[in-house]
Image (cartoon, rainbow, N blue to C red):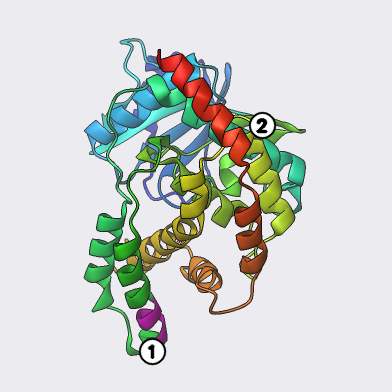
Amino acid sequence: MAVYTPIDKKHLAEIVEDYNLGKLGSCTGITAGSVNTNYLVETSRGKFLLRIDEVKNELDVKRELDLILFLRKHAFPCPQPLADVRNHHYREVTGKYVTVYRWIDGRPAVGDRLTPARLETAGRALADLHTVTKSYKKGIENRFGYDRIAAVYGEIRRRLPSYFKRITRTLDDEVEYLRHYLENKLPKGIIHGDLFPDNLLFRGEKLVAVLDFEAASRGKFIFDLATAVNALCCDGQSYSLPKFEALIAGYESLRPLSLAEWDAFPNELRLSALRFTITRLHDFFLRAVEDGKRDDKDFRDFYERLRILRRERDGGMEGLLMAMATGYDYRKYQRVKAMEKRGSK
């Protein structure tokens, strides 16, 4: 369920008029998703997406919109925010912020639809995001960095039930391990932070939109790629080496990874798995819920990935490690560095 906030007829009519959407036909809640409330609005001028932000304050909403508008100017496939008659891209309705987007016809790449070809396309799109935004200088705070995740875990640890002892021991150990690992000198920039299958819309074989920039921020590129691997290349039971190779091939076709990034890859996978395990635990145990409306995602999906990455259980990690160890082409890296030096002169 992802319709947490109802929108009354008065506010809906005002939005339709102010955004010049035509004559209202219908407004239907969209159950997909778990963070914000979304409606499909159909009018005489077509279909539109109306989003009610459930968690962000006004400044964060403005920052997200600014990034998306920047990406649109650079032909990156993402949603198109609409402006009202006063050229405003959002408005406040009953204490929450509302945005309107053009509807995008496409299907999410879930299940069997996530083919190697589409994974390669997804990898290329993620690298495109990382390169296109090099000129984007505005800061977006990373709400899911290690320090924040460790602090969230500290908040929920004492609230976890007694039968979570085995899980708690694993998370305690992982938080401590990553505290000593942290490598912050890796290439950074704007990252998506949430490249899951349902955030990739395809029409046929064409990627028509990367959705949900809710978690977009400044961060390590390799963390963003690791999150994509965790989300797109694992079915919960094991990692798929062919899917991993397809995603990486697409990514490196635009942005080859450095030796330092290859070296950091295994730990970034673990950091990403820890991040989603802990935030999902937090949402289940600490997030306020009204009348049981919130649909909490199962933390165990990423907890089991973490166990595979820690090599506590089988699940394809050996194949990934071998691919990471052999996937680095030193001569290619040297060519990239030489090009960067020539470009800086």
Contact, mark 1 vs mark 2 (Cβ under 8 Å): no
* Residue closer to the observer: 316 or 168: 316
Quadrant of the rendering where the C terminus is positioned: top left
Disc 1 marks which amino acid? Tyr
Total numbered labels: 2
From which residue to which does the magenta span run? 166-170
Q: Secondary structure at mark 1?
A: helix
| Relative depth, front residue between 158 and 338 | 338
Q: Secondary structure at mark 2?
A: strand
Q: Amino acid at mark 2?
A: Leu
In reply to whether residue 102 is colored magenta, the answer given is no
Instruction: Report whether residue 26 is seen.
Output: no
In the image, which disc is placed on residue 207? 2
Q: Residues within 10 Å of mark 2 (few under 14, many from 20)?
A: many
Residue 24's spot in the image, x, y percent?
51, 23
Above or below, 308 against 85 in this view is below
- Please tell me whether residue 15 is drawn above or below residue 197 in the rendered image: above
Q: Who's the residue at 56% across and 71% down the image?
A: 308
Residue at label 1? 163
